[in-house]
Image (cartoon, grey):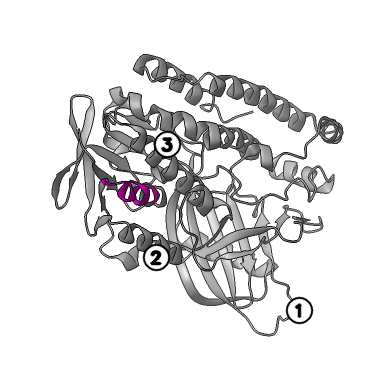
Amino acid sequence: MGKNIIVAGAGHGGLTAAYHLSKSGYTVTVYERAAQESELGYEWEDFFDARTFDEAGMPEPATGKIPKVPISFYGPNPDDEPISQVFNNGEVEMHMNRKELYAHLLGLVKEAGVQIVFGCTIYAPILIGNRIVGIKTSLGDFMGDLVIDAAGVDSPLRTNLPDYIGVQKTLRKYEYVYAYRAYFNRLPGFEDVKNEYKTYFVDDGDSGITWAVTTEKTVDLLIARFEPFGQEEIDRMNVIFKADNPHLGDELVSGGQVTKIPLRRPIAILVADGYAAVGDSACMTVPIAGSGIANSLRAGKILADVICADRNEEYSAYSLWKYQTEFFEKIGNSSATIDMARTLLLNLKKSDFEFFFGNKILTSEDLSFNTNETSAKEMFSHFSPSIIIDRLKKVGANRSLLKKIGTLAVRVGKLRLITSRMPEVYSRADVLRWAKKYEQLFADTTL
């Protein structure tokens, strides 16, 4: 084999892997659909874990660290008090514009010697037998010793792999969302309105996620739905937003796109002979929050380390399997647990949310975690047995809800058993059997 690495798509995880591999002596080329660098990323700002760059082994940007921003969670009943996060003084997180983040990452990979080909649409993988050996693109066929798939949630590589490879090709409903994100002007005359990060568990009885983040100059709106939607739904939601946020103006400052985002645990199999998936291609977003920046950058470093450790330069499913096991141990298993907990949210009715808020089933401490936290242990660390028992007593008045929580607890137990039995060494038959059990546990989204 050799050291010619193809990175399909300029995703965050792919760029991280490219950076480390190029610095280690590999020839790395990134093939990206966008026509030029300025087209990468959305005019969105994201919060993510302040530890991310350190754990990804990359230099931090000069700016971006800020005190953690508390979120206020609102239920469907306007008379119920919101639940607001509380952080200790000194806790920080990263806050970056997506385009600024890309500028930082691209600067690093170029300095490391990575070649980037823009304006290159990827069509499909090229296979010889069971091995992925290159990519078909609008600029021709390109061959490599390893293809890193960082081409997004609907990656044309992953979705066109043969079934016998075993890598999951398509996502089920509720495993992705269509998200609209836009920044509007903040109207003058509302100086008494505090800057606030409002997340709505239920908006007007519809399934989905919404938020309104008020800053000194703008109001950042998010509308996320499990079904595609257009301007009519955006206009309808703007009316609802304005009723609760009268300082929301009509001038679109930036953003305004609708994009598809994975919202689930990582796919069951990340590797094949000559192939590894990272970032949105592998569904590495945080299942409840949706952002995948932290997970993707961390995964890119894990992948690069495993590739560099392959002294025989085989880049086979067998030699790349260490990437899978290490990623799941550090990130994937927790993401799967969070995704299982998300099943409860999918099954809650408007009346259930009213019950939660009205009876104070959830507290500020319960929700005082970073929205991009990757560890289920950190997110739910304060739930001692006594606290759990106390909350269940409160829930007891709602038998239907108690039953759902009980069913969820059983499934979480089964999930932990399955993830603990992931094969330590790659064998296609063993891996396919394990992946089938892993995915089947999430097939039923009802509780």
User: Is residue 297 inside the magenta stretch?
Assistant: no
Whole-Å distance between the Cαs marked 1 and 3?
45 Å
Which range is magenta? Answer: 16-26
Whole-Å distance between the Cαs marked 1 and 2?
36 Å
User: What residue lies at 72% left-to-right and 61% top-to-bottom?
Assistant: 90
User: What residue lies at 81% left-to-right and 34% top-to-bottom?
Assistant: 384
> Can you give x and y, in whole percent of width and height, for residue 220 in the image?
57, 67
Amino acid type, callout 2: Ala
Q: Looking at the image, tell me whether mark 1 or mark 2 is earlier in sequence order.
A: 2
Whole-Å distance between the Cαs marked 3 and 2?
30 Å
In this view, the residue in front, 233 or 61, is 61
Q: Which dot marks residue 134?
A: none
Going by the picture, which residue comes out furthest to the left?
140
Amino acid type, callout 3: Leu
Q: How many marks?
A: 3
Q: Are marks 1 and 2 in contact (CB under 8 Å)?
A: no
Q: Looking at the image, tell me whether mark 3 or mark 2 is earlier in sequence order.
A: 2
For disc 3, the marked residue is 171
The residue tagged with tag 3: helix, strand or loop?
loop
Q: Quadrant of residue 84?
A: bottom right
- Visible residue check, residue 225: no
Q: Is residue 209 left or right of residue 263?
A: right
Q: Is residue 234 left or right of residue 282?
A: right
The residue tagged with tag 2: helix, strand or loop?
helix
For disc 2, the marked residue is 103
Q: Which dot marks residue 192?
A: 1
